[in-house]
Amino acid sequence: MTGAGTIAKPNPAPLGDEPVFAFGRERRMHARAYDYWVSLLDGRRMPRVRDMDQRRMTSFSGRSVLVDLPEQGGAPVIAYLGDELRAESEIVAANPTLDDVRSGTLLGELLRRFSDIVAYEAPVGFEAEFAGRDDTHLLHRGILLPFADDMGRLSAVYGVMSWKQVASVEPAADIAAAIGSVMASRPSAPVVCAWGDGPGAALTVSASLPPQPLAQRLAQARTWAALAATDRTRGDASLNAALGAAYDYMLAVRDASLTPRKLVRMVFGADVRRIDRIRFSATLDHAVRLGLGPGRLPGWLDNQDGGHIAVALAERRARRSERRAATAGEQREWVDAQAALGQIELAIDQDLMLLIGRRVPQGVEVIAPVPADDHFTEAAVERVRRAG
């Protein structure tokens, strides 16, 4: 653990204190973790990671994970993984990385929500059912808690989970309908956990947050980019969040010299694939073209068929159209400035055209006009301009 040593292995929980997911005691472990987090605040927005005390965490450490965030961005590091969560996720590496986390595991579900807490920097609670390995269904409840470094910047995330396998027996129809109604009514957006007493009890993710320093915005974008490179569970969500954070950083900097191409290198690294660099840059350019405001790009990308690739293609088409319009204006000015070689009578309503002619002893005979094709005509005019 960053600045706090290693979390001690948990003592066996007293009989009856094991968290039950659906009815009665499921919140106890998470409430203890949340209350402990609140006790460390001391007037700060987030407690310091170096203040974590392993002696006060033994009751929930077995089902917890601590993820360190590099100060300058980059791939998050699993600094601690509790025995029970490690066993459920079948992780044997002594020092696991995000690449060791498989989808279909509880740890994978926990990290799937990782970008939420990077965005809000406030406790995030969640509960859901998902299909695990071997066709098992698990009900799980979790909480993610942010911790800061000595400068107040998000430095680590501590997650606690409880879970219970869903019985294979089919429930009565009225019970199934009631549970289905409750699950359907839950908001899709993450909600800041209100377990326990303290400042976080009254917060929601929609509450206004103070402006982030530019360095923190950039680190946030780099963290999401690192998550996108290793994330096998969220589809394009982490990538969209990385592009959104990069776009927000660009808007906040207000520096014309910071082009999307430069920004993509800053956020995704110089070794990002060329095709990805082109697509990411075009996506940011298109957001600028559309005038999207801060915080809007990730959600907008989530709703685009084809995601950022389709957006990049749309930007390419828009650029091509702009170039054609600019070139057409220049070409027409050039054509109007040229002296005529001759004049013939021809009943054609095109303003600018290509003609096919043949040489004869008296000069040139016009045989026929070329069917209207703006691309063909523009290419021919441009070739004559360059030859002249």
Image (tube, helix red, strand yellow):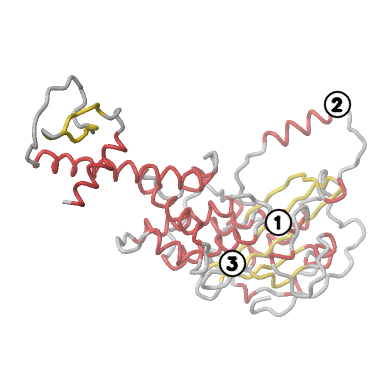
Say which residue label 2 marks: 173
Q: Answer few, some or many: residues within 10 Å of disc 3's Cα (few below 14, many 20 plus, some between 14 and 19).
A: some
> In the rendered view, does 183 fall on the left or right side of 209?
right
Please report whichever mark, 2 or 1, sits nearer to the chain's N-terminal start: 1
- Please, is residue 40 above or below residue 195 in the view? below
- Please, is residue 320 above or below residue 217 in the view? above
Circle 2: residue type = Ala
Percent coordinates x, y for residue 175 in the rendering: 84, 30
Say which residue label 1 marks: 110
In terms of depth relative to the viewer, which is nearer, 46 or 277? 277
Circle 1: residue type = Leu
Q: Residue at x 29, y 60 (%)?
A: 256
Q: Secondary structure at mark 2?
A: helix
Question: Does any portion of residue 353 appear in the rendered image?
Answer: yes
Circle 3: residue type = Leu
Q: What is the spatial separation of the Cα atoms under label 3 and label 1, in whole angstroms?
A: 23 Å
Please report whichever mark, 3 or 1, sits nearer to the chain's N-terminal start: 3
In terms of depth relative to the viewer, which is nearer, 244 or 204? 244
> Which mark is on residue 35?
none
